Amino acid sequence: MVISKAPVVSTREIHENIFLLEARCPVVASQIKPGQFCNIKITEFSSPLLRRPFSVCDVNGNSIYFMFNIFGEGTKLLSRKREGDTVNILAPLGNGFTIEGDYEHAIIVAGGLGAAPFPFLTKKLDGKKISTFIGGRTANDVITYGMENIQTATEDGSLGFKGNVVQLLKNNLPEIKKHKTRIFSCGPNPMLRALKEFCIENEIECQASTECAMACGFGICQGCPIETAEKDKYLLVCKDGPVFDVRDVII
Amino acid sequence: MSVDLSVNIGNLKLQNPVILASGTVGYGNEISNFTDLSKIGAIVTKSISLKPRKGNPPQRIVETPSGMLNAIGLANVGLEVFINEKIPFLREVNSTVICNIAASTIEEYVECTKALNDHDTIKAFEINVSCPNVKEGGLTFGNDTNAVGRITEKVRAATGKPVIIKRTPNVATISESAKVVKQEGGDAVSAINTLVGTAFNIRTRKPKIFNVTGGLSGPAIKPVALAKVLEISRNVEIPIIGIGGIVDWSDAVEFMIAGSTAFQIGTINFINPNAGLEIIEGLEKYCEETSISKLSELTASYQI
């Protein structure tokens, strides 16, 4: 874990209200793994006060990339960062996706901005058969940047399958069953809950990247609990996650 | 010129007045990746209770203008795990440890203090009588000056180590309870704990944190905290550990001028976990620039 003042290379709007920020940060770029995150202090001032957590979207040489939408004051300021500006990055944080293991088929399941960590994962899944399922409410919510072999689902039917992404996945079950599969997922909680049920029913390994409001990102504020099978204690999203085996947590 | 940064709280001598506040450093292990705990004046552990506490469900934290609300709910590992698993690490990193204790009965405060009293690593106790986020733990005591007096008296009797009582700002006159703490043999008061606050989501009309209300901290509370420190300083002769929104050395100087012997930094640790060491450097420089040879001269040096 390091704290690094990273120069911004560029910020681009790659999709309606979806931004991609590139920052030069060799020390983090060389260490970070897909699914891990960075906690970013956007300005030097006390408002916005806290760092903002962002999963790493991609790594290329000395550069790291973050994908985000404008949600509040912090992300609005971040979207205006230009070459010559800096961001203060605390990273790498948390446990990322486990790529290693005995499986042939990697399936990525993303909902909305849950697509953010997958361009980097896709790169690192070298040699595996990859299928990507991306869902959103409408075509506007479907972000396909940096991913491959994509099927899409939208609730209003404006793009791809009409329905949710887990239903789309169910329709592909016979094909999925042909290989030893591992699912990597990130998205809204209702999607992750439905996906968890589907994976347990069909005995498919599934890792999910979870989300919770947090302050520090490394375990001292205790702000981001997640319920587990063990009733008398929580795990922390920042330190024990954010990626969990879906069987280990209650989403 | 070498500057003497040391301060005394009761019979506890700290190498400098920078203390990391309870609940913002866990038990030291995570933050030690970013900072050298042996150089910090002291660290205060996350509140320890007799039995482990799970804490509140999410959402526990929300940012507010120049501050944050938290309702963690005293999540902690409990006395036994603290002794067996956390104290050894704190000893190893050579940190001056103040143990914060939370309880729901006076007996529980005493039992925890006694159980920890023999551990050399623990140099002092900070008694949390002011957690705003659990129903039975603290705030009910914190609002009752008589109860604060009884707790101070009983804990005082249980240990020869310095006893610091952490005070809530959520009372009409904070100096009244500081008087009681002094009368009952407390060595210092730390002030202030967080201010009760809340925030709503305007779409769902629901509170942003599960507990409905939380404790407000960060730069937003600094002026309130300074006024409370000043109030105690002008009315009671007792060492004050100032707390509330300190982010840099200049804030720390302000707290000392207002009456603090030492001070705690909290929310800033989440943003800059090395802030404590940076503040120490800043204080040294400030003393050199203003020809102060002993930092403790600053305490209560207000010109009013």
Image: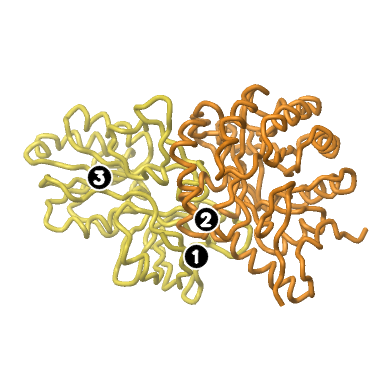
Distance CA(mark 2)–CA(mark 3): 26 Å
Viewer-nearest residue: B40 or A183:
B40
Please state, as top left, top right, bottom left or bottom right, where the N terminus of chain A lies in the image: bottom left
Q: Mark 1 points at which residue?
A: A88
| Chain letter for mark 1 | A
Task: Determine crowd level at label 3: few under 14, some 14-19, many 20+ residues with C-alpha closer than 10 A.
Answer: many
The residue sitting at 42% across, 40% down in the picture is: A236
Viewer-nearest residue: B144 or B65:
B144
The residue sitting at 35% across, 53% down in the picture is: A36
Chain identity for the colour orange used in the image: B
Disc on the earlier residue, 1 or 3? 1
The residue sitting at 54% across, 48% down in the picture is: B25
Task: Determine crowd level at label 1: few under 14, some 14-19, many 20+ residues with C-alpha closer than 10 A.
Answer: some
The residue sitting at 75% across, 43% down in the picture is: B188
Q: Is residue B301 left or right of residue A103?
A: right
The answer to the question of whether label 1 and label 2 lie on touching residues, with beta carbons closer than 8 A, is: yes
Viewer-nearest residue: A79 or A48:
A48
Q: Mark 2 points at which residue?
A: A51
Disc on the earlier residue, 1 or 2? 2
Amino acid type, mark 1: Asn
Q: What element carries label 1?
A: strand
Task: Determine crowd level at label 2: few under 14, some 14-19, many 20+ residues with C-alpha closer than 10 A.
Answer: many
Q: Where is residue B95 in the image (x, y as percent from the top left)?
A: 55, 52
Q: Name the residue under label 3.
A: A184
Above or below residue B207? Residue A62 is below
The colour one sees for chain A in the rendered image is yellow
